[in-house]
Amino acid sequence: MIRMLLPLISIFFIYMIIKWVKNVMRETKEALSKASEELGFRYEEETKWWKPKEISGVIDGYKCEIRVYTQSHGKSSTTYISFDVYFPNSLDMGLKINWRGKFEGDDDHLTDLFLERNMDLVEGEKKRLRRLKITDTSVSSRRILTKKYYRNPENIVRAMHDLVNFTKKLK
């Protein structure tokens, strides 16, 4: 009796995992579609489930992108949502503030001036704009994709506007 039930339970378990993955993908697609409509962005629907999903557009003269992708870490993987805002013109400072908050630059004087002017702003926004990364050409924020974000397009729109407003404040 147990030998007959074990294959049925295995098949049912695999079916439920596949169904769950399809639901998550559908919800993510719907949230990105609604967010792109609200932001006035272009959304090209990706037919392959393993490809990153992207929407892009312009807000107040700043090119913006939102990307959902999965990154593998050995035996496990994590799905992220990444928000990118590109400066209209490069800052040309050789500047880079990485995900861990480490500051780097090609020209120490210019980097020091930038940090002096913006350190309080960057430190104040680190909690709200997770995994903040600043370079000469762009500002990025990245989060782990959770139910709060893939089911709620308002949170996606708010996060994009927060990043654009932060980028405008940089001097």
Image (cartoon, rainbow, N blue to C red):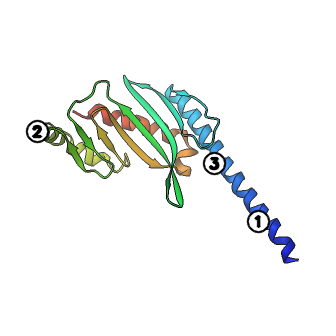
Q: Residue 24, which numbered label?
A: 3
> Given this view, does label 3 or label 2 mark the residue nearer the observer?
2
At x 54%, y 30%, the residue is 36
3 vs 1, front mark: 1
Residue at x 26%, y 48% (from the top left corner): 123
Q: Position of residue 135 (x, y in %)?
A: 29, 38
Q: Is residue 40 above or below residue 108?
A: above
Q: Report the amino acid beneath label 2.
A: His
Label 1 or label 2, whichever comes before in sequence order: 1
Residue 51 sits in quarter: top right
Q: Quadrant of residue 119?
A: top left
Dot 3 or dot 1: first in sequence order is 1
Q: Residue at x 84, y 77 (%)?
A: 2
- Disc 1 residue type (three-letter): Ser
Q: Amino acid at mark 3?
A: Val
The residue that label 2 is drawn on is 109
* In the image, farthest residue toward the right: 1
The kind of secondary structure element at disc 2 is helix
Q: Residues within 10 Å of mark 3 (few under 14, many from 20)?
A: some
Report x, y in % for residue 17. Answer: 69, 57
CA separation, marks 1 and 2? 63 Å
